[in-house]
Amino acid sequence: MSEPDSSQTLFWTKRWEQGKIPWDCGGIPPSLVEFLRRVPGPTRVLIPGCGSGYEVRAFHEVGHDVSAIEFSAPAVAHAREILGPLGERVIHGNFFKHDFAGNRYGLVYERGFLCSLPTERWTDYAARMAALIPPGGKLVGLFLYGNEPEPPPFPLTEPVAAELLGRFFRRVYSESVEDSVPVYKGLERWQEWERIPG
């Protein structure tokens, strides 16, 4: 039987069950800590593919109305265990299919979600983000750039990012990240993309 692809729930469920989660940094990335220090809140925040959900607490503690969504049941259980009462903010569902009940988000946080998706799903990602973020809202977080001989992860390149996200967003901030987990070392950039009208 062939290995399921990374757009399928089973692919990630197996990794959580086997403890193969090298992207899990065990806490809140320093780049997010810095962002939360310098950016005013609060706003409504969404974290897709939240994994262990550490960032839910980080956004909540500075006053944001934060929700997260994750489609791997073991990951959801782990996040709820870590977060305690805040675990109720973690939705067990598919980001692309879930009914967000008309909610839109002033900020969507990205870490490890886009690069987990096969590249043929990336246009769906961009369109879904554009639908959930109103003009002036932001898609922010840690994006992977570079080359990966055995994906996932699936890193971006500059031309692909410009084409993929540039239809809906303009990049307003970008910096390289030194403090990454080994699987992302040298690939991560903290970026902020602002939703443009249209």
Image: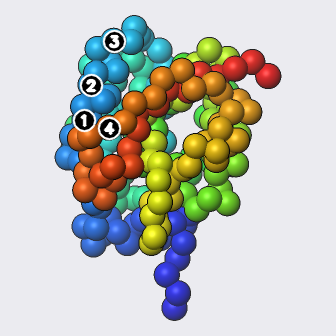
Image quadrant containing the C terminus: top right
Q: Is residue 184 shown to the viewer in this render?
A: yes
Residue closest to the eye, 81 or 12 = 12
Question: How far apart in space, not on screen, are marks 1 and 2 (Cα)?
Answer: 7 Å
Amino acid of disc 1: Ile
Viewer-side residue, 9 vs 174:
174
Q: Amino acid at mark 2?
A: Val
Q: Residues within 10 Å of mark 2 (few under 14, many from 20)?
A: few
> Where is mark 4, residue-wise?
177
Q: Secondary structure at mark 3?
A: helix
Q: Are marks 3 and 1 in contact (CB under 8 Å)?
A: no
Find residue 33 and name its label.
Answer: 2
- Of callouts 2 and 3, the N-terminal one: 2
Which mark sits nearer the N-terminus, 1 or 4?
Answer: 1
Sequence-first disc among 3 and 4: 3
Name the residue type under label 3: Arg
> Is there CB contact under 8 Å for labels 3 and 4?
no
Using a 10 Å C-alpha cutoff, classify the residue at mark 1 as few (fewer than 14 neighbours), some (14 to 19) or many (20 or more). some
The spot of residue 116 in percent (x, y) is 48, 57
Q: On screen, 20 above or below 2? A: above
Residue underneath mark 3? 38
User: What type is the residue that disc 4 sits on?
Assistant: Val
**Horizontal side, residue 154 vs residue 31: left or right:** right
Residue drawn at (58%, 62%) of the image: 118
